[in-house]
Amino acid sequence: MELKKLLTGIENLKSRGDLEIDIKKIECNSKKVIPNSLFIAIKGYDFDGHEYIEEAIQNGAIAVMLDMSADFKKIKLPKDITVIITDDTRKALARVSCNYFGNPSRYFKLIGVTGTKGKTTTTYMIKSILESAGYKVGLIGTIANYIGDECLGYSNRTTPESLELQGLFYKMAKEKVDYVVMEVSSQSLKLSRVEGSYFDYGIFTNLYKDHISLKEHADMNEYFETKLKLFSMCAKGFVNSDDFKCNKIIKSSPQCDIKTYAVDNKADLLAKDITITNISVDFKVKIETRNERIKVNIPGRYSVYNALAAISLAINLGINAEKIKEGLDNIVVPGRNELVPNKEDLAIMIDYAHTAESLENILQATKTYTPGRVICVFGCGGDRDTEKRPKMGEVSGRLADYTIVTTDNPRTEEPEKIITEIEAGISKTKGKYEIIVDRKEAIKKAIKMMNKRDIVILAGKGHETYQEINGKKNPFDERIIVKDIIGEKKND
């Protein structure tokens, strides 16, 4: 594509050289550059793409895009290379990617789901309902990307970088999907990964303290204001009115037609007569003129909220009650309140809870419907937010009947160091606990001590099928491990 056409819609450009050259590929990774590429230099938290311009040119880049904030004295630019300068190369990368792939999000209805918790489950619910109604659906999110049942690959982040995202949109448009439902993280909004995408619908689940760090958001206000951007990008929105930020979203987004859903507060869609068991939730909700009984086989009060978000959208799209109920029936979201089927019918749940808030949510929820003990097995990831470690320990010590502190993904940190930091929190409580560093042995201990009245929560890893230790991802699928342990238990 002609370079000039790739630059359509990018403001405040300065350039030197030929803008009519033909570009074969766009890249922001110098190692992936091929002859006749446009290389866009991005300043990241750990790396600065401007330091790799020379390598990109050696690999065949014929044009480079630089950020205005770059140190130009350190950059060597041959005279035969076309140079473009802009005030935000991240935003420019997104716009160039949209242009390169022909603005693919115009060719289907795009649904964005943002919020601290519930994004993944809500997107799976929406996908299932839409498919029950006969639509072809694409999904992009934390676990994996799909067109229908076809997995396009597992995800490295909640929302892909803009170049990858537009490539996925292009494939989905080419496959003639009707809808794409995607998780929209605060980082993707902050770093312009979704810039230039045409959102038709936006959904807000909730806001909790999370992602506050040097590499994410400075404070809760910035975190919320970043999420708010989604509702400036879509025509219709659906917001949880039980969340304290609901009114601000509505007031700050006058151009967006926002409907609300709730359990406690006044809303356009309200759940009533809620029943929660250790395997499901069911509730009544008004669809058209009738009060319909909805059942979701994911236990917990938050499942009601996630379902309400999906139902709100479905009603707006004119999908009837039977198709909504069919879509929500027997839905399984990998690693989100996922009950592991087993021969002894023990309640063993895998959940991605990896913050103090999410761990508190899952433990409080399970305590309300579990007749026996809540046994929690968890650790914390290495090379990540260290402040949450004692907080998670304190939460489990306060709420679980028994806690086994173990490893998660220690990455490059010593597991014992992480566990010591967790123990600093749990020791403040009167909760019973023990430490078993080996996660498989920790799971084995939890299962061997439980009975059918108890529930075991394996928190933190969720959908992951590996454990990362010293930079290596070792196979570690908790579903397989649970089944193996129960097989051994039965033979004892």
Image (tube, rainbow, N blue to C red):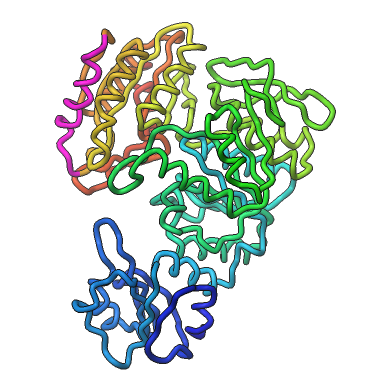
The one nearer the camera, 18 or 431, is: 18
Going 52% across and 74% down the picture, which residue do you hit?
A: 100
Residue 376: x and y, percent? 35, 19
- Look at the magenta stretch and give its main secondary structure: helix
The one nearer the camera, 4 or 14, is: 14
Residue interval drawn in magenta: 412-429
Q: Is residue 198 left or right of residue 422?
A: right
Q: Is residue 151 left or right of residue 58?
A: right
From what the image shows, is residue 119 above or below residue 81?
above
Residue 77: x and y, percent? 26, 85
On whether residue 428 falls in the magenta region, the answer is yes
Instruction: Give the quadrant of residue 33.
Output: bottom left
Q: Residue furthest right?
A: 289
Q: Quadrant of the C terminus?
A: top left
Going 26% across and 29% down the picture, which residue do you hit?
A: 389
The one nearer the camera, 181 or 455, is: 181
